[in-house]
Amino acid sequence: MSKNLKIVQDYFNAVAIGDFETVGNLFADDAVWHQPGKGVQSGTYNGKRELFGHLGNFGKWSDGTFAMDEIKFISENQDLVAVSIHFKAEKNGKTLSMNGIDLLRIEDDKIKEVWLFSERIDEEDEFWNFASK
């Protein structure tokens, strides 16, 4: 396994078990996160502080049910690593369950930039807008 694939696999493994110290160590201090859509969760987050605040909202808004529960495949092209995932969350009888693609750029052995792509972004926006209230 290449170094970049290992960094990304370590990230997903750490997220799966809630090891946010490891997650933090895998990101560059000035990492950039691009969250798609037009919902409360959408936007660009710069630096670890904004990024971890943003990621923490998924757990808070979903009462801890948000999970990336399946990695379908991981592939790399130089400093880019694409990951096909399935993610889910639930709150007050509403559910979110869909596929996505996470594209991560690795620089100096750290995750420097992340772009997310959701299978049905309008449904994801609707769920997070509901869940955040």
Image: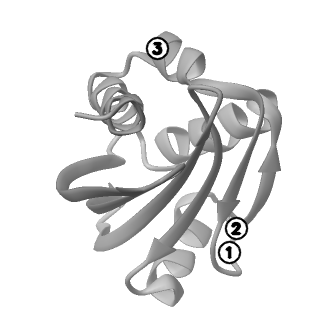
- Cα separation between marks 3 and 2: 25 Å
The image quarter containing residue 3 is: top left
**Disc 3 on helix, strand or loop?**
helix
Residue identifier under label 2: 42
Near-viewer residue (56 or 105): 105
Give me the residue at 36% from left, 22% from top.
18
Amino acid at dot 3: Thr
Q: Do residues under tags 3 and 2 come within 8 Å of each other at their CB atoms?
A: no
Near-viewer residue (11 or 2): 2
Q: Position of residue 60 (x, y in %)?
A: 53, 39
Amino acid at dot 2: Ser
Q: Do residues under tags 2 and 1 come within 8 Å of each other at their CB atoms?
A: yes
Q: Is residue 122 above or below residue 55?
A: below
Residue 3 badge: none
Give me the residue at 54% from left, 49% from top.
79
**Disc 1 on helix, strand or loop?**
loop
Q: Is residue 103 above or below residue 54?
A: below
Give me the residue at 56% from left, 26% from top.
109
- Cα separation between marks 2 and 1: 5 Å
- Cα separation between marks 3 and 1: 28 Å
- For this view, does 71 lie left or right of residue 4? left
- For this view, does 81 lie left or right of residue 34? left
Residue 22 badge: 3
